[in-house]
Image (spheres, rainbow, N blue to C red):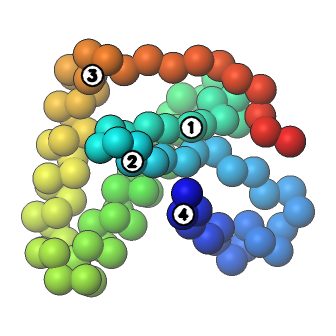
Amino acid sequence: MKPLPPPDDAITNADAVEVLRGWIVDGDLQVSLAFESFGDRAETWGQLLAEAAVHIADAMSAQGYGDRQAIFARLHASLLSNLERPYPGLHGAIKDPVQ
């Protein structure tokens, strides 16, 4: 496993909480999340996904993968498509956090 480094502010703040991780396992995407982190505020999860998309578009553009707006448009289209038609094998289980 190759974990990503946390943001600088998360390193220095003892109250920081990790809320989302993603992996590629045998070519498939897998996600682990702390769904209860925002209580019943689903819109905060939407904000997290939107901010992640902006950072992804910025990083991909900075690394020469194309125009930021074009990348963002592709991300947006994929997000909407995957929300409307989720992957058929998508499933999960609620587990206790690792201590």
Give me the C-alpha separation between circle 3 and circle 1: 17 Å
- For residue 96, side relative to residue 8 (left or right): right
Q: Residue at x 12, y 75 (%)?
A: 66
Decide which of tag 3 and tag 2 comes sooner along the chain: 2
Please, what secondary structure does the residue beneath circle 3 have? Answer: loop
Give the residue type at disc 4: Lys
Numbered disc in front, either 3 or 2: 2
| Disc 1 target residue | 32
**Vertical placement of 64 versus 6: above or below?**
below
Give me the C-alpha separation between circle 1 and circle 4: 15 Å
Q: Position of residue 84 (x, y in %)?
A: 22, 22
Give the residue type at disc 1: Ser
| Disc 2 target residue | 24
For residue 86, the mark is: 3
Please, what secondary structure does the residue beneath circle 1 have? Answer: strand
Give me the C-alpha separation between circle 3 and circle 2: 17 Å
Of 8 and 30, which appears nearest the observer?
Answer: 30
Residues under numbered marks 3 and 1 in contact, where contact means CB atoms less than 8 Å apart: no
| Disc 4 target residue | 2
Q: Quadrant of residue 28?
A: top left
Residue 12 visible somewhere in the drawing: yes
Give the residue type at disc 2: Ile
Q: Residue at x 25, y 39 (%)?
A: 79
Give the residue type at disc 3: Pro
Decide which of tag 1 and tag 4 comes sooner along the chain: 4
Decide which of tag 2 and tag 1 comes sooner along the chain: 2
Give me the C-alpha separation between circle 2 and circle 1: 12 Å
Badge 2 local density, few (<14 within 10 Å), some, or many (20+)?
Answer: few
Badge 3 local density, few (<14 within 10 Å), some, or many (20+)?
Answer: few
Q: Position of residue 52 (x, y in %)?
A: 42, 56
Q: Residue furthest front?
A: 26
Of the 4 image quadrants, the one containing the C terminus is top right
